[in-house]
Image: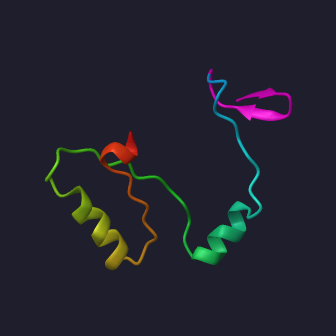
Amino acid sequence: MVVNSGSAIFGKSTNILWHKSSVDKIDRQELLQQKGCVIWITGLSGSGLLDVTSIMFYVYELIVGICTGPTGR
């Protein structure tokens, strides 16, 4: 991580900056009663990707954000 003018720049990219949130990580974890993570699932259309996220949401009661198709690009 490189520091540039007080903002953290990740890797060699100059257009990705860290922004301080009004809710910090610990408060968010306590509010949602879960720790955050990213699970990146790839597959062909119709292969059941949304089924996996539905199971995570309904069975395990996790908050799930889904980014598919043109939205994810």
Residue 64, how many percent across, how many down? 42, 65
73 over 28 or under it: above or below:
above
Q: Give the range drawn in magenta.
A: 1-12
Q: Where is residue 43 in the image (x, y as percent from the top left)?
A: 21, 45
Which residue sits at x=14%, y=52%? 47
Q: In this view, does 11 lie to the left or right of 56?
A: right
Residue 54 location in percent, x, y?
Answer: 29, 69
Point 34% across, 69% down: residue: 56
Q: In which quarter of the image is the C terminus?
A: top left
Quarter of the rendering containing residue 23? bottom right
Q: Is residue 2 left or right of residue 67?
A: right
Display coloring: rainbow
* Quadrant of the image occupied by residue 32: bottom right
Q: Which residue is drawn at 36% across and 73% down?
A: 57
Q: Which x, y percent locates residue 25?
A: 69, 61
Q: Is 3 included in the stretch rendered in magenta?
A: yes
Q: Which residue lies furthest to the front in this view?
A: 70
Looking at the image, the residue that sits furthest to the left is 46
Q: Would residue 33 be found to the left or right of residue 20 on screen?
A: left
**Closest to the observer: 52 or 72?**
72
Q: Front-most of 9 and 33?
A: 9
Of the 4 image quadrants, the one containing the N terminus is top right
Q: Left or right: 61 with respect to 48?
A: right
Against 40, residue 28 (above or below) is: below
Q: In which quarter of the image is residue 29?
A: bottom right
Q: In this view, does 16 lie above or below 57?
A: above
Farthest right residue in view:
5
Q: Does the magenta stretch include residue 58?
A: no
